[in-house]
């Protein structure tokens, strides 16, 4: 956004830094980017552009304009580090939820593993995963929209198809690796009568909602991939909406906000089809998710994992007259269907429009003038009501995500915000509120320095450079943690887990002064130990997949985008 305005041509066709932007980084002679020819690399030093000397290379005005996109931008605009910490947090929360939830389902005969009401730690590790997925959707909508706003192109069918295929190149290679892994392991979702079920395999790439709702997104290997398909569907919609706003001369901010309202309305309509049963409180036990998937998945878990036989009984809530098996199939469309999970994407898209406005010439000029006048951090006397309002909203956002992720319960505090809303409202707008809260938490790390919403200490924590490298592995961890967890639970004997629980509780009960000798810490320690094992193995597998699969695809995507930029230039 800022490259073309940070560099200007003077009357002598010399490329000079713009005096209106004193904050622009002054770089030493830059290296030639990989894949860039020497002919396009015109020196941008005023002593070398263009000179009548025979020793200096000739550089015309057209060549200078072509070289402009390769000038290095300020560091703040090249990487939004505030999202690194959020990615790691969301990924850890999803893995913790799956380990807690499905260990309690497979080992249902171990008493206390599913007693989340009496164990705050298990309630914390289990409940953190649901809002984390909406946080991932918010980040995806933000970066997709921000990329489209930077391009500033009108809508074209060819360009839209190319953008969708590029997005598929980001997801499908690792998606394909997981599906091939499922085929090699004999996953019952992808095999039928000892033959690959190609219709289900193809549907996995297109919709991941194969048949009977829940059976399309629950299996032994590729369960988390349903969110990748939801991401692809809504991203295709964003790739259509944002260029259309420029073609039709519409306000992107208002258009995307209207799309957010439509997304909330669609989810409310899905909830209204059976409002009495589409509630998470109707879940009686984690084994219900296996029961809803039906055979042959249930038989596989009973035979290979030693899971006890499942019992069909009424749903746990009084508002639903269905059995637990019918309830999970009724709740699945609200949880997994793409159109019912679209609202968080548009929250991130709306945030991208605000961030893009901050990068415009008018807002940057105001920020520079403010920096010149204050010469450092803004004094408290200049804080206005807007800054105070955002700080209050920021505190509310921290409180909301702490309650939704179970941190308040872990610390022994009663929820304040979530308890004031009815369950029906949480099911409809809870994910949207999660996305808005996380967007508000990330915003202070992205705005320019000395902006009213800038929190330097908060930015130093979320955007720490050490978080950048592990944050690159989050997508691979998300896709691969499920098959790793299933294999660990398959290999790990149930007796070992039971011994960990019993020995931990007996060791603590012998210490009368221990505050942990309440009979439930053994379950928490067993889940924590299992989580460490699963996460360690997943990180190793994700590092390999990132190097062999994800990085080559990203390089291929960037190379194609550079070629398109050269053609436009």
Image (spheres, helix red, strand yellow):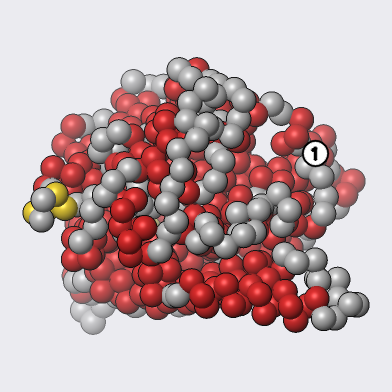
Q: Residue at x 66, y 53 (%)?
A: 115
Q: Residue at x 51, y 43 (%)?
A: 134
The front one of 132 and 262 is 132
Q: Residue at x 48, y 26 (%)?
A: 322
Q: Residue at x 39, y 40 (%)?
A: 292
Indicate the quadrant where residue 63 lies.
Answer: bottom left
Residue 186, position as x, y percentages in the image: 20, 61
Q: Is residue 235 above or below residue 93?
A: above
Indicate the quadrant where residue 557 lies.
Answer: bottom left
On the question of residue 71 being in view, the answer is: no
Q: Is residue 412 above or below residue 234?
A: below
The front one of 35 and 138 is 138
- Give SS at disc 1: loop
Residue 387, position as x, y percentages in the image: 78, 41
Residue 174, position as x, y percentages in the image: 27, 61
The front one of 60 and 383 is 383
Tag 1 residue: 416
Q: Is residue 149 above or below residue 67?
A: above
């Amino acid at each position: 956004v800022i490259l073309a305005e940070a560099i200007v041509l003077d009357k002598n066709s010399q490329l000079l830094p713009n005096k209106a932007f004193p904050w622009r980084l002054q770089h030493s002679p830059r290296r030639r980017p990989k894949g860039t020819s020497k002919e396009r690399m015109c020196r941008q030093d005023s002593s070398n552009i263009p000179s009548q000397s025979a020793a200096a290379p000739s550089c015309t005005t057209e060549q200078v304009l072509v070289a402009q996109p390769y000038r290095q931008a300020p560091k703040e605009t090249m990487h939004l580090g505030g999202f690194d910490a959020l990615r790691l947090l969301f990924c850890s929360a999803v893995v913790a939820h799956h380990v807690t939830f499905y260990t309690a389902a497979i080992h249902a005969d171990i008493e206390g593993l599913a007693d989340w009401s009496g164990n705050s730690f298990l309630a914390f590790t289990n409940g953190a995963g649901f809002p984390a997925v909406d946080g991932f959707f918010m980040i995806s909508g933000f970066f997709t929209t921000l990329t489209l706003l930077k391009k500033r192109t009108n809508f074209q069918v060819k360009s839209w198809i190319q953008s969708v295929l590029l997005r598929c190149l980001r997801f499908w290679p690792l998606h394909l690796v997981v599906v091939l892994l499922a085929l090699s392991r004999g996953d019952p979702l992808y095999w039928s009568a000892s033959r690959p079920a190609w219709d289900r395999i193809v549907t996995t790439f297109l919709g991941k909602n194969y048949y009977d709702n829940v059976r399309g997104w629950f299996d032994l290997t590729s369960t988390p991939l349903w969110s990748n398909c939801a991401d692809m569907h809504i991203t295709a919609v964003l790739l259509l909406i944002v260029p259309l706003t420029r073609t039709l001369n519409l306000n992107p901010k208002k258009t995307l906000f209207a799309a957010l309202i439509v997304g909330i309305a669609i989810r409310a309509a899905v909830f209204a089809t059976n409002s009495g049963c589409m509630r998470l409180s109707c879940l009686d036990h984690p084994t219900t998710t296996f029961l809803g998937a039906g055979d042959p998945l249930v038989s596989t878990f009973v035979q290979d994992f030693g899971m006890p036989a499942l019992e069909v009984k009424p749903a746990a809530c009084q508002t639903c007259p269905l059995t637990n098996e019918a309830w999970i199939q009724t709740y699945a469309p609200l949880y997994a269907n793409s159109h019912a999970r679209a609202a968080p994407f548009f929250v991130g898209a709306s945030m991208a429009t605000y961030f893009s406005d901050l990068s415009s010439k008018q807002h940057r000029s105001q920020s520079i003038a403010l920096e010149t006048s204050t010469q450092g951090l803004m004094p408290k006397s200049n804080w206005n009501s807007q800054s105070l309002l955002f700080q209050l909203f920021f505190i509310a956002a921290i409180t909301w995500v702490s309650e939704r992720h179970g941190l308040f319960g872990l610390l022994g505090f009663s929820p304040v915000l979530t308890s004031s809303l009815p369950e029906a409202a949480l099911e409809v707008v809870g994910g949207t509120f999660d996305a808005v809260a996380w967007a508000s938490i990330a915003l202070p790390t992205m705005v320019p320095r000395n902006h009213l919403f800038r929190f330097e200490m908060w930015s130093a924590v979320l955007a720490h450079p050490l978080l950048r490298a592990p944050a690159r592995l989050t997508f691979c961890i998300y896709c691969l943690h499920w098959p790793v967890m299933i294999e660990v639970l398959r290999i790990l004997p149930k007796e070992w887990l039971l011994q960990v629980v019993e020995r931990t509780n007996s060791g603590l009960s012998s210490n009368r002064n221990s505050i942990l000798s309440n009979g439930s810490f053994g379950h928490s320690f067993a889940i924590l130990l299992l989580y460490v094992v699963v996460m360690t193995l997943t990180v190793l597998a994700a590092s390999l997949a990132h190097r062999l699969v994800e990085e080559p695809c990203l390089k291929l995507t960037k190379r194609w985008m550079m070629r398109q930029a050269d053609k436009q230039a």
